[in-house]
Image (cartoon, rainbow, N blue to C red):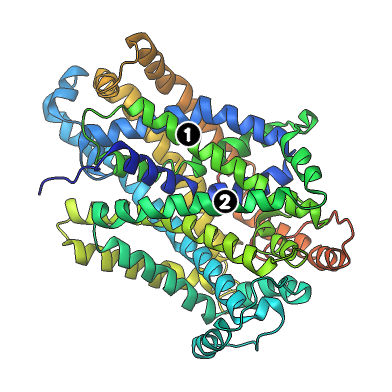
Amino acid sequence: MKRQIWSNRLTYILTVAGATIGFGATWRFPYLVGEYGGGAYVAVFVLAMLLVGIPIILVENVIGRRAHTNSVDAFSVDVSSADASGIDSGKSQHLSRFWKIFGYMGMVGAFGILAYYMVIGGWVISYIVHIFIGILQGIGADSSGSGATLQSLLQNLGGLDLSSKLDKTATSSFYDTHITQGGFSVVGFTFIFVAINWLILRKGIIEGIERSVKYLMPLLLLCLVLMVARNLTLEGAMEGVRFYLMPDFSALSPQLFLYVLGQVFFALSLGFGVMITLSSHLNKEENLIKTAIITGIINTLIAVLAGLMIFPSLFSAHLAPDSGPSLVFKTLPIAFSQMHFGSFFAIVFFVLLLIAALTTSLTIYQVIISVLEEKFGFSSKKAINFTLGFIFIFGNIPCALSSSLLSSVRIGGSDIFDAFDFVSGNIFFVLTALGASVFVGWVLKDKATKELSNGSNAPQWAIKIWHAYVKYIIPAIIIIIFVGGLVGVSPKADSNESAADSSAESSLVESSLNLSESSATTSHPNHATPTNPTKAE
């Protein structure tokens, strides 16, 4: 079967941008900024994007376009490459089997992230639906079960007043009652998000993913600009802008640098085969250097705009900016309860999150689907149904119930949600990125520089510097991230911190309801403030 090629550079860039934005830019980046020095974190992030992010994007792009195949077979060592490395061609097959291990690691990591990522997408849909129902405005009849929720939704759609504010009490309690303790209702909303992905994926990478992203990404940018423009006009918004953009370099620490490096990896979807898979559909004349730079710029721009959307509203509402992972889902919605047209802007905000989650999840699914189709001979329909069904049963359902019905199930001291997060984010992603860098730097060698030169007018000396950088510096950086994630913390440490963090939640909610300044921090009861640099959410 002839491999599908992206229609043009713009659609490829939009798809890659969609893959890299996700919750990394709209959720994780803002709460890490809030916890680690505000503007100091932003400054270090921009620097890390230039020195680490873009070079590794090029690594995965080179592997993907060179092979024009799935993210596992892309690690093949062909005869010509083996000969160029002074390796007997008879050993190239054995080398290929070894290097393909890193492709499988990325595939397993993709399963791990989708296991809980789809659940977070379900949370977003839950917020949107319950705003329409009227629960967050304190006017709708609460409902348990999908039937009652659907009935309430239909009853309230006609009478929804988008100019109304969200109710403070209802908003502050929603996260605990409907998300962490939502039980099978969370499973239901997760299923809806999975179904949306299925409807798009079944049309293929060009007719499905490419076509949908052409509309979704401009809509995401429109929502983001609208939210930024609105929040910058709020009273006290400039305090949030100063916190966000004025760096406090006294906050710089080795831990901050470690978190920034981890954020760059997660924000750019590095290490789980997404870039390899997407670039495998590029033509040989495409300028990989230019697309990588544009990708890094767009991701940084979206992340910075996300901060300008969030921090002005927090400071305007006198809410703590260092609320940890619950910043977007628990703390920020309280700000909408103090904002005119709060219902409207809350819907815009969560639609923005939904689009960001969707454009990312589509491309992560495609990593696994491509391997099943091209390596194991699955039909497209079978590969899609198997991938989404398997992950839903063995990943999404356990993660959705990890803080309610399955809260007693612990893995290394952590709940199921955090266990998937820790293993995928701290082990599989990092090792896959390390393998990819070593593969390009030490195995492909001149093949890599030749591939990068195709379609590029960059001078050869610059490409050789990149190759040496990838060969020696990037692996060292990745090893530092890996060791920092394993030695510095453990899943058990996350769990232990949860109990301490949860005691601060009530004081934050109480103080925010009184519109007083709060210095407390909040956290998902079972998903504490991250203590490892590559922790996804």
User: Residue 110 shows which numbered tag?
Assistant: none
Q: Quadrant of residue 457?
A: top left
Q: Amino acid at mark 1?
A: Gly
Q: Nearer the viewer, residue 361 or 430?
A: 361
**In the rendered image, which quarter is residue 59 located in?**
top left
Is residue 389 something one can see in this rendering?
yes
x, y percentage for residue 271?
A: 41, 42
Residue found at the far top of this picture: 461
Q: Helix, strand, or loop for circle 1? A: helix
Q: Amino acid at mark 2?
A: Leu
Q: Tell me: 430 left or right of 170.
A: left
Q: Is residue 357 left or right of residue 171?
A: left
Q: Nearer the viewer, residue 232 or 319?
A: 232
Residue at 56% over, 83% down: 158
**Is 380 placed above or below 1 here?**
below
What residue is disc 1 on? 296
Q: Position of residue 518 (x, y in %)?
A: 86, 56
Whether residue 317 sits left or right of residue 271 in the image: it is right
Q: Relative to residue 537, is residue 331 drawn left or right?
A: right
Could you say which disc has been placed on residue 224 in the image?
2
Measured Cα–Cα span from mark 2 to mark 1: 18 Å
Dot 2 surroundings within 10 Å: few (below 14), some, or many (20 or more)?
many
Tell me residue 451's x, y (percent): 25, 24
Q: Is residue 432 above or below residue 203?
A: above
Kindly identify the residue that appears in the image at 45 percent across and 50 percent down. Answer: 218
**Mark 2, secondary structure of its residue:** helix
Estimate how packed mark 1 is, as few (under 14), some (14 to 19) or many (20 or more) residues with alpha carbons within 10 Å: many
Say which residue appears at 74% left-offset and 71% top-offset: 172
- The image position of residue 247, as x and y in percent, is 75, 31
From the viewer's side, name the closer residue of 147 and 238.
238
- Counting residues from the N terminus, which is met first, the one under dot 2 or under dot 1? 2
